[in-house]
Amino acid sequence: MEAELDPRIRPIAFGIVGLLYDLIGFMRIAFGEDLESALIMICVTDATMQKFMPGASPDSEVMLRVKLDESVRGSISRRMIADKTGLPRETVRRKVAQLVARNFLYVDANGAIRATPRLHDPELRQAVIDAHESVKTYQRVVSSYGVT
Amino acid sequence: MTQLVLKPEQDAQAEIDPRIRPIAFGLVELLFDLTFFIRELYGDDLDCAQIMICVNDATMRPFMERLPADSDVLRMRAPPEEIRGSISRRMIAEKTGIARETVRRKVAMLIEAGHLVADEEDGVRVVPRLHDPQTHRLLEAGHAAIKRYMTLVRSYGID
Protein backbone atom coordinates (compact mmCIF):
# COMPACT_ATOMS: atom_id res chain seq x y z
CA MET A 1 0.00 0.00 0.00
CA GLU A 2 1.22 3.49 -0.87
CA ALA A 3 2.54 5.45 2.12
CA GLU A 4 0.40 8.38 3.23
CA LEU A 5 1.56 11.95 3.11
CA ASP A 6 1.98 13.89 6.37
CA PRO A 7 -1.31 15.92 6.32
CA ARG A 8 0.57 19.10 7.29
CA ILE A 9 2.58 19.14 4.07
CA ARG A 10 -0.06 19.93 1.45
CA PRO A 11 -1.50 22.93 3.40
CA ILE A 12 2.04 24.23 4.00
CA ALA A 13 2.83 23.82 0.28
CA PHE A 14 -0.39 25.61 -0.69
CA GLY A 15 0.32 28.43 1.76
CA ILE A 16 3.95 28.82 0.70
CA VAL A 17 3.05 28.90 -3.00
CA GLY A 18 0.60 31.73 -2.27
CA LEU A 19 3.18 33.56 -0.17
CA LEU A 20 5.95 33.17 -2.75
CA TYR A 21 3.59 34.40 -5.45
CA ASP A 22 3.40 37.69 -3.54
CA LEU A 23 7.00 37.80 -2.29
CA ILE A 24 8.53 37.36 -5.75
CA GLY A 25 6.78 40.58 -6.72
CA PHE A 26 8.29 42.20 -3.61
CA MET A 27 11.73 40.81 -4.47
CA ARG A 28 11.56 42.27 -7.96
CA ILE A 29 10.69 45.71 -6.54
CA ALA A 30 13.22 45.59 -3.71
CA PHE A 31 16.10 43.51 -5.02
CA GLY A 32 16.12 43.32 -8.81
CA GLU A 33 15.46 40.88 -11.59
CA ASP A 34 17.61 37.81 -10.96
CA LEU A 35 17.86 35.42 -8.03
CA GLU A 36 21.61 35.65 -7.49
CA SER A 37 21.42 39.46 -7.34
CA ALA A 38 18.41 39.17 -5.03
CA LEU A 39 20.30 36.84 -2.71
CA ILE A 40 23.27 39.23 -2.59
CA MET A 41 20.95 42.19 -1.91
CA ILE A 42 19.22 40.26 0.87
CA CYS A 43 22.59 39.31 2.39
CA VAL A 44 23.92 42.89 2.29
CA THR A 45 20.66 44.37 3.62
CA ASP A 46 20.75 41.87 6.47
CA ALA A 47 24.37 42.81 7.29
CA THR A 48 23.41 46.49 7.17
CA MET A 49 20.48 46.02 9.58
CA GLN A 50 21.98 43.35 11.87
CA LYS A 51 24.28 45.96 13.40
CA PHE A 52 21.48 48.01 14.96
CA MET A 53 18.20 46.06 14.86
CA PRO A 54 18.73 43.23 17.40
CA GLY A 55 19.45 45.67 20.24
CA ALA A 56 16.83 48.27 19.31
CA SER A 57 13.67 48.61 21.40
CA PRO A 58 10.31 49.11 19.63
CA ASP A 59 10.17 52.77 20.70
CA SER A 60 13.80 53.65 19.91
CA GLU A 61 14.87 56.41 17.54
CA VAL A 62 16.10 53.76 15.11
CA MET A 63 12.50 52.73 14.39
CA LEU A 64 11.30 56.25 13.76
CA ARG A 65 14.04 57.95 11.76
CA VAL A 66 13.63 57.75 8.01
CA LYS A 67 17.39 57.87 7.52
CA LEU A 68 20.02 56.51 9.90
CA ASP A 69 23.54 57.73 10.43
CA GLU A 70 26.13 55.75 8.49
CA SER A 71 27.98 54.91 11.72
CA VAL A 72 24.91 53.00 12.95
CA ARG A 73 24.57 50.83 9.83
CA GLY A 74 26.60 47.69 9.17
CA SER A 75 28.51 46.54 6.10
CA ILE A 76 29.92 43.31 4.67
CA SER A 77 32.87 42.26 2.52
CA ARG A 78 32.49 40.52 -0.85
CA ARG A 79 34.25 37.47 0.59
CA MET A 80 31.73 37.24 3.45
CA ILE A 81 28.84 37.60 0.97
CA ALA A 82 30.23 34.60 -0.92
CA ASP A 83 30.59 32.60 2.32
CA LYS A 84 27.06 33.39 3.52
CA THR A 85 25.27 32.88 0.20
CA GLY A 86 27.33 29.96 -1.14
CA LEU A 87 27.77 31.83 -4.44
CA PRO A 88 31.18 31.65 -6.16
CA ARG A 89 33.43 34.64 -5.32
CA GLU A 90 33.72 35.64 -8.97
CA THR A 91 29.93 35.68 -9.30
CA VAL A 92 29.66 37.84 -6.18
CA ARG A 93 32.33 40.24 -7.48
CA ARG A 94 30.55 40.58 -10.84
CA LYS A 95 27.01 40.89 -9.44
CA VAL A 96 28.07 43.36 -6.74
CA ALA A 97 29.70 45.53 -9.44
CA GLN A 98 26.43 45.47 -11.39
CA LEU A 99 24.36 46.30 -8.30
CA VAL A 100 26.70 49.18 -7.41
CA ALA A 101 26.43 50.50 -10.99
CA ARG A 102 22.63 50.37 -10.64
CA ASN A 103 22.65 52.21 -7.25
CA PHE A 104 21.23 49.26 -5.29
CA LEU A 105 24.50 48.95 -3.34
CA TYR A 106 27.49 51.16 -2.67
CA VAL A 107 31.07 50.71 -1.53
CA ASP A 108 31.97 52.51 1.72
CA ALA A 109 35.25 54.22 2.60
CA ASN A 110 36.70 50.90 3.84
CA GLY A 111 35.84 49.03 0.65
CA ALA A 112 32.95 47.14 2.30
CA ILE A 113 29.50 46.85 0.75
CA ARG A 114 26.32 48.52 2.03
CA ALA A 115 22.73 48.65 0.87
CA THR A 116 21.56 52.01 -0.45
CA PRO A 117 19.00 53.41 2.03
CA ARG A 118 15.53 53.26 0.47
CA LEU A 119 12.98 53.26 3.28
CA HIS A 120 12.21 56.90 2.46
CA ASP A 121 10.64 55.61 -0.79
CA PRO A 122 6.82 55.35 -0.29
CA GLU A 123 6.55 52.60 -2.95
CA LEU A 124 9.03 50.40 -1.08
CA ARG A 125 7.38 51.12 2.28
CA GLN A 126 4.02 50.04 0.83
CA ALA A 127 5.65 46.90 -0.60
CA VAL A 128 7.04 46.10 2.88
CA ILE A 129 3.57 46.42 4.46
CA ASP A 130 1.99 44.36 1.66
CA ALA A 131 4.58 41.60 2.14
CA HIS A 132 3.81 41.50 5.87
CA GLU A 133 0.11 41.09 5.05
CA SER A 134 1.03 38.22 2.72
CA VAL A 135 2.82 36.44 5.58
CA LYS A 136 -0.25 36.91 7.77
CA THR A 137 -2.40 35.45 4.98
CA TYR A 138 -0.07 32.42 4.94
CA GLN A 139 -0.66 31.97 8.65
CA ARG A 140 -4.44 32.15 8.22
CA VAL A 141 -4.34 29.62 5.36
CA VAL A 142 -2.28 26.97 7.18
CA SER A 143 -4.17 27.56 10.46
CA SER A 144 -7.46 26.83 8.65
CA TYR A 145 -6.11 23.28 8.08
CA GLY A 146 -5.03 22.97 11.71
CA VAL A 147 -1.32 23.49 10.98
CA THR A 148 0.53 25.48 13.65
CA MET B 1 19.59 46.48 -16.88
CA THR B 2 17.22 48.58 -14.82
CA GLN B 3 18.81 51.43 -12.94
CA LEU B 4 17.42 52.03 -9.47
CA VAL B 5 15.88 55.49 -9.53
CA LEU B 6 16.10 56.81 -6.02
CA LYS B 7 13.25 58.97 -4.82
CA PRO B 8 14.34 62.32 -3.39
CA GLU B 9 15.44 61.81 0.19
CA GLN B 10 13.36 63.26 2.97
CA ASP B 11 14.77 65.27 5.81
CA ALA B 12 17.03 63.04 7.92
CA GLN B 13 14.93 63.98 10.94
CA ALA B 14 11.65 62.96 9.26
CA GLU B 15 9.87 60.04 10.90
CA ILE B 16 8.50 56.84 9.40
CA ASP B 17 5.83 54.40 10.54
CA PRO B 18 7.70 52.53 13.33
CA ARG B 19 6.45 49.20 11.96
CA ILE B 20 8.37 49.57 8.71
CA ARG B 21 11.95 48.89 9.84
CA PRO B 22 11.17 45.80 11.97
CA ILE B 23 9.05 44.34 9.17
CA ALA B 24 11.80 45.06 6.64
CA PHE B 25 14.35 43.42 8.97
CA GLY B 26 12.12 40.36 9.40
CA LEU B 27 11.46 40.13 5.65
CA VAL B 28 15.16 40.22 4.88
CA GLU B 29 15.76 37.28 7.23
CA LEU B 30 12.73 35.42 5.82
CA LEU B 31 13.70 36.04 2.20
CA PHE B 32 17.24 34.83 2.91
CA ASP B 33 15.72 31.45 3.83
CA LEU B 34 13.04 31.44 1.13
CA THR B 35 15.52 32.31 -1.62
CA PHE B 36 17.43 29.13 -0.79
CA PHE B 37 14.09 27.32 -0.85
CA ILE B 38 13.29 28.74 -4.32
CA ARG B 39 16.75 27.93 -5.69
CA GLU B 40 16.69 24.35 -4.41
CA LEU B 41 13.20 23.64 -5.73
CA TYR B 42 13.13 25.69 -8.91
CA GLY B 43 16.75 26.61 -9.81
CA ASP B 44 18.45 29.97 -10.31
CA ASP B 45 16.18 31.43 -12.96
CA LEU B 46 13.72 33.91 -11.42
CA ASP B 47 11.34 33.70 -14.41
CA CYS B 48 11.23 29.89 -14.15
CA ALA B 49 10.67 30.14 -10.39
CA GLN B 50 7.81 32.59 -10.87
CA ILE B 51 6.24 30.37 -13.56
CA MET B 52 6.54 27.29 -11.31
CA ILE B 53 4.92 29.16 -8.42
CA CYS B 54 2.11 30.39 -10.69
CA VAL B 55 1.44 26.87 -12.07
CA ASN B 56 1.64 25.32 -8.59
CA ASP B 57 -0.97 27.80 -7.40
CA ALA B 58 -3.24 27.05 -10.38
CA THR B 59 -2.83 23.30 -9.81
CA MET B 60 -3.61 23.35 -6.08
CA ARG B 61 -6.13 26.16 -5.67
CA PRO B 62 -9.18 24.43 -7.28
CA PHE B 63 -9.19 21.62 -4.73
CA MET B 64 -7.41 23.11 -1.71
CA GLU B 65 -9.88 25.96 -1.26
CA ARG B 66 -12.77 23.49 -1.02
CA LEU B 67 -11.19 20.88 1.24
CA PRO B 68 -12.23 20.36 4.85
CA ALA B 69 -9.29 20.23 7.26
CA ASP B 70 -9.74 16.46 7.73
CA SER B 71 -10.04 15.55 4.04
CA ASP B 72 -8.35 12.35 2.80
CA VAL B 73 -6.81 14.38 -0.02
CA LEU B 74 -4.40 15.91 2.48
CA ARG B 75 -2.91 12.45 3.07
CA MET B 76 -2.67 11.41 -0.59
CA ARG B 77 0.76 11.32 -2.20
CA ALA B 78 -0.83 12.68 -5.41
CA PRO B 79 -4.44 13.94 -5.61
CA PRO B 80 -6.61 12.57 -8.49
CA GLU B 81 -5.88 14.33 -11.78
CA GLU B 82 -9.54 15.28 -12.21
CA ILE B 83 -9.54 17.56 -9.16
CA ARG B 84 -6.21 19.25 -9.97
CA GLY B 85 -6.24 22.52 -11.88
CA SER B 86 -4.19 23.68 -14.83
CA ILE B 87 -3.36 26.99 -16.50
CA SER B 88 -2.71 28.16 -20.05
CA ARG B 89 0.58 29.73 -21.11
CA ARG B 90 -1.32 32.93 -21.95
CA MET B 91 -2.76 33.09 -18.43
CA ILE B 92 0.70 32.47 -16.91
CA ALA B 93 1.98 35.47 -18.88
CA GLU B 94 -0.95 37.61 -17.69
CA LYS B 95 -0.59 36.62 -14.05
CA THR B 96 3.20 36.91 -13.85
CA GLY B 97 3.78 39.87 -16.17
CA ILE B 98 6.43 37.82 -18.00
CA ALA B 99 6.43 38.21 -21.82
CA ARG B 100 4.41 35.52 -23.64
CA GLU B 101 7.34 34.35 -25.75
CA THR B 102 9.47 34.02 -22.59
CA VAL B 103 6.70 32.02 -20.90
CA ARG B 104 6.40 29.74 -23.93
CA ARG B 105 10.16 29.10 -23.99
CA LYS B 106 10.55 28.63 -20.20
CA VAL B 107 7.49 26.35 -19.95
CA ALA B 108 9.03 24.16 -22.68
CA MET B 109 12.25 24.01 -20.63
CA LEU B 110 10.34 23.12 -17.45
CA ILE B 111 8.41 20.36 -19.26
CA GLU B 112 11.68 19.01 -20.66
CA ALA B 113 13.16 19.05 -17.13
CA GLY B 114 10.19 17.05 -15.80
CA HIS B 115 8.81 19.82 -13.53
CA LEU B 116 5.65 20.53 -15.57
CA VAL B 117 3.34 18.55 -17.86
CA ALA B 118 0.92 19.73 -20.55
CA ASP B 119 -2.59 18.24 -20.36
CA GLU B 120 -4.98 17.35 -23.21
CA GLU B 121 -6.32 20.91 -23.45
CA ASP B 122 -2.75 22.25 -23.63
CA GLY B 123 -3.03 23.60 -20.11
CA VAL B 124 0.01 23.23 -17.90
CA ARG B 125 0.18 21.60 -14.46
CA VAL B 126 2.93 20.66 -12.05
CA VAL B 127 4.31 17.16 -11.62
CA PRO B 128 3.43 16.04 -8.05
CA ARG B 129 6.49 16.20 -5.77
CA LEU B 130 5.12 16.41 -2.24
CA HIS B 131 6.08 12.79 -1.51
CA ASP B 132 9.72 13.63 -2.26
CA PRO B 133 11.67 13.77 1.07
CA GLN B 134 13.72 16.79 -0.11
CA THR B 135 10.54 18.76 -0.97
CA HIS B 136 9.06 17.72 2.37
CA ARG B 137 12.18 18.95 4.21
CA LEU B 138 12.24 22.26 2.31
CA LEU B 139 8.57 22.93 3.04
CA GLU B 140 9.02 22.28 6.76
CA ALA B 141 12.07 24.58 6.72
CA GLY B 142 10.06 27.27 4.92
CA HIS B 143 7.24 26.97 7.46
CA ALA B 144 9.75 27.27 10.31
CA ALA B 145 11.30 30.37 8.68
CA ILE B 146 7.85 32.00 8.49
CA LYS B 147 7.23 31.24 12.17
CA ARG B 148 10.61 32.83 13.03
CA TYR B 149 9.55 35.91 11.05
CA MET B 150 6.35 36.23 13.08
CA THR B 151 8.26 35.77 16.35
CA LEU B 152 10.77 38.45 15.32
CA VAL B 153 8.24 41.11 14.30
CA ARG B 154 6.13 40.39 17.40
CA SER B 155 9.23 41.07 19.53
CA TYR B 156 8.94 44.64 18.21
CA GLY B 157 5.25 44.81 19.12
CA ILE B 158 3.95 44.20 15.59
CA ASP B 159 1.04 41.87 14.97
Image (tube, rainbow, N blue to C red):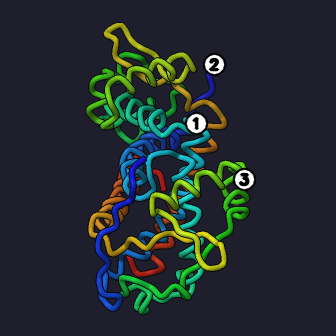
- Can you tell which of label 1 and label 2 is closer to the viewer? 1
Query: What chain does mark 1 sit on?
Result: B
- Can you tell which of label 3 and label 2 is closer to the viewer? 3
Looking at numbered disc 2 in the image, what kind of residue is underneath it?
Met
Q: Is A138 or B108 nearer to us in this picture?
A: B108
Q: Is residue A28 left or right of residue B35?
A: left
Looking at numbered disc 1 in the image, what kind of residue is underneath it?
Gly
Q: Which mark is residue A1?
A: 2
Q: Which residue is mark 3?
A: A89
The percent position of residue B5, horizontal first and vertical second, equals 34, 62
Whichever of labels 3 and 2 marks the residue nearer the N terminus, that label is: 2
Q: Is residue A27 left or right of residue B144?
A: left
Give the Cα separation between the discs numbered 3 and 2. Answer: 48 Å
Residue at x-position 38% and y-position 26%: B103
The percent position of residue A22, horizontal first and vertical second, equals 36, 49
Residue at x-position 28% and y-position 35%: B95
Q: Which mark is residue A100?
A: none
Looking at numbered disc 3 in the image, what kind of residue is underneath it?
Arg
For the residues beneath circles 3 and 2, the answer to whether they share a chain is: yes
- Say few, some or many: other residues with alpha carbon within 10 Å of mark 3 (under 14 / 14 to 19 / 20 or more): some
Could you tell me which secondary element the residue under label 2 belongs to? loop
- Say few, some or many: other residues with alpha carbon within 10 Å of mark 2 (under 14 / 14 to 19 / 20 or more): few
The percent position of residue B36, horizontal first and vertical second, equals 60, 48
Q: Is residue A43 visible?
A: yes
Give the Cα separation between the discs numbered 1 and 2. Answer: 33 Å
